[in-house]
Amino acid sequence: MVVTFLLIFLYFAVAVTVALTVLLYVFQCDLLYAAGFPAGSRSTVAKPSQYGLPDKEVVLMTKDGVKIRSYVMIQRGEEVAIQSPTILWFHSHTGNMGHRLPIAQVFYKKFGYNVMMLSYRGYGLSEGKPNEKGINVDAQTALEYITHHPILRHTKLIAFGQSLGGAVALNLVSKNEDKFAALIIENTFLSMTLLIPHALPALRHLVYLCHQTWRSYKAIQNIHRIPMLFLSSLKDELVPPAHMAKLYDTSHTSGVKIWKEFENGTHNDTCMQPGYFEAIAEFGRDNVWDLSDDEKN
Ligand SMILES: *[C@@H]1O[C@H](CO)[C@@H](O)[C@H](O)[C@H]1NC(C)=O
Ligand SMILES: *[C@@H]1O[C@H](CO)[C@@H](O)[C@H](O)[C@H]1NC(C)=O
C-alpha cells in the first residue's frame, strides 16, 4: 500500500518536472521577449509626429516573409541628409520603437542625424513572434533597406543597441562590419545564458534549456575595425554592469573604444543621466562626422 503510494507520488513528481521543463523550453521566448510590457505595447505605437519628427513608416518584408514596421526619419534636403550620419536603432526586450522616439528626437533634432528604428517581429505592430534567429533577420532586413536607399546608402552608419538591442547590434555589425562607421551599445549582456542566473535566479539550474543564446561575447570578437562606445549604468538591476566591462575588455577593435559609465544609472534610465547625450555627441563628432565637412562649416 505504502509502496504504491510512493510510486504514484514519484510518477507525479517526474511528470510535473518534465512538464515544467517542456513548458520552459517551449515558452521561453514569451518569458525573454516581453513585447507586451508596458501594457498596450502591442496595440499602440507612438508616431514620430507626436515628437515633431517626420512621420515616415516603412513596412519591411523579411526574407522569411514577416512584415515588420520601421520609422525612417531623414534630414530635410538631400544634400544635408547625405552628409548626416544615420543611426540604426535597436530597442530592448520591452515595449516597441515608439517608446524610443524621445531619444530619436534628440538624435534627429539636436545632433542632425538621420534615424531608422524598427519594432522587431512580435513587437509593436510588427507581425510574427520574437526569437533570436528572427530578430537577427529583422535587423539584417533593416540594414538592407538602408544600403539600397538612394540617400541613406551614402551616409555614415552607426548601429545603436540598448540591452537586448545591444546583442542585436553586435550580431549585425559582426556580420556586416564594412557597412558601419561606428557602434554604440548600452547596458547589454555577454550572452543570455550568462545573464539568466542574475536576471531570473529561480531558473539558474535550468540554463541548459536556454536556446536563445545571444552570444555577444563571441560576436564582439568579430568586430575588427570600427570605433565603439560603451554606455554602462553602474546601478543596472537587470544586467550586471560587469557584463559591459567584460565586453569592453573582450573587444579588440582597432578603432577607438570609449567607456562611459553612469554612477546613478539603472537599466532603463541611462538616457536621463547627466552626460548621456553629451557622451554620444562627442563620440559621433570625433569618430563619425567627416572632419573635412566640419571645417567647411
Ligand atoms: C549620484 O547620486 C548621488 C546621491 O544622490 C549624488 O550625490 C551624486 O552627485 C550623483 N552622481 C551623479 C554623477 O549624478
Ligand atoms: C524601467 O525600469 C523600471 C524599474 O526597473 C520599471 O519600473 C519601468 O516600468 C521600466 N520601464 C520600461 C519601459 O521598461
Image (cartoon, grey):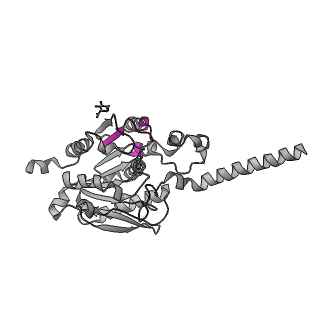
Vertical comparison of 246 with 17: above or below: above
Vertical comparison of 141 with 266: above or below: below
Vertical comparison of 139 with 13: above or below: below
Judge from the rendering whether residue 221 lies leftward or rightward of residue 85; answer left or right. right
Q: Is residue 253 magenta?
A: no
Judge from the rendering whether residue 152 lies leftward or rightward of residue 201; answer left or right. left
Q: Residue at x 25, y 39 (%)?
A: 275
Which x, y percent locates residue 166?
39, 48
Q: Quadrant of residue 70?
A: bottom left
Q: Quadrant of the N terminus?
A: top right
Of residues 130 and 17, which is closer to you in this image? Answer: 17
Residue closest to the far left: 296
Q: Residue at x 85, y 46 (%)?
A: 5
Q: Residue at x 37, y 48 (%)?
A: 162
Q: Residue at x 33, y 54 (%)?
A: 100
Judge from the rendering whether residue 13 lies leftward or rightward of residue 149; answer left or right. right
The answer to whether residue 227 shows anywhere in this view is no
Vertical comparison of 114 with 13: above or below: below
Q: Is residue 227 magenta?
A: yes
Of residues 59 and 47, which is closer to you in this image? Answer: 47
Of residues 95 and 216, which is closer to you in this image? Answer: 95
Which x, y percent locates residue 169?
38, 51
Q: Which residues are magenta?
A: 219-243
Q: Quadrant of residue 202?
A: top right
The answer to whether residue 220 shows anywhere in this view is yes
Of residues 167 and 204, which is closer to you in this image? Answer: 204
Residue closest to the far front: 39
Which x, y percent locates residue 138?
41, 61
